[in-house]
Amino acid sequence: MPPWLVNLFRLLALVLVVALSVFIFSIRDQAEQLAVYGYPGIFVLAFLAYATVILPAPGVAVVFTMGAIFNPGFVALAAGAGAALGEMSGYLVGFSGQSIAERSKWYERIEGWMKKYGGVAVFLLAAIPNPIFDLAGAAAGTLKMPVWRFLLFCWMGETVKMILFAYAGSSLLKFIN
């Protein structure tokens, strides 16, 4: 592939991520209404919540609530898959070569983990609720981790995290009743 075409794809990826983040942030209050559509709605809501880069959006709070209403295992699977696909936005930022956090201390630390541990680092960072996972996605994209590998480890980690939140919501409902 010619270098100019690669650069065009990188620029388009960056523009797409920024536009998607601004759009999702602008509809964040209405997004929770998607949960009424059951598991597909939970999937879409998780995708939207995790597709933003840096900007906050609802995510695990909805999974917690939906775990009390629906089967928590299925809620976790739907939310984990949606979140993993949504995290591709951070990966695309890194792939675009325009990582905004490339010079930060956190980014350098995470990039070191990514170089040393690869998919295991993605899994652990996705499984632990933290505000810096976008940096892990950007590092994975910058380091050209294969997309399938990033998605697999991200999905596994996000699903573990969602299982914890969905069952916590389910347990709370049982405790209240």
Image (tube, helix red, strand yellow):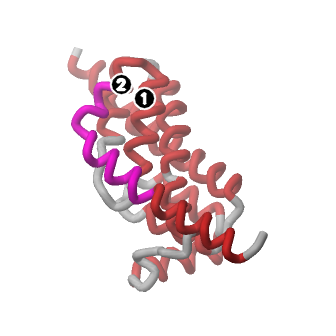
Q: Residues within 10 Å of mark 1 (few under 14, many from 20)?
A: many
Looking at the image, the residue that sits furthest to the right is: 1
Nearest the viewer among 117 and 144 is: 144
Quadrant assignment, res 130: bottom left
Judge whether residue 10 is colored magenta.
Answer: no
Q: Residues within 10 Å of mark 2 (few under 14, many from 20)?
A: some
Earlier-in-chain disc, 2 versus 1: 2
Question: Would you say the magenta stretch is mainly helix, strand or loop?
Answer: helix
Quadrant assignment, res 2: bottom right
Q: Which mark is residue 42?
A: 1
The residue at 55%/45% (across/down) is 85
The picture places residue 165, in percent across and down from the top left corner, at 38, 37
For mark 1, give the secondary structure.
helix
The picture places residue 84, in percent across and down from the top left corner, at 54, 46
For mark 2, give the secondary structure.
helix
Q: Quadrant of the N terminus?
A: bottom right
Residue designated by label 2: 35
The picture places residue 61, in percent across and down from the top left corner, at 30, 38
The residue at 32%/33% (across/down) is 62
Circle 2/circle 1 CB separation < 8 Å: yes
Kind of residue at badge 1? Ile
Q: CA distance from mark 2 to mark 1?
A: 5 Å
Nearest the viewer among 124 and 95 is: 95
Q: Relative to 3, is 121 on the left or the right?
A: left
The residue range painted magenta reads 17-34
Kind of residue at badge 2? Ala
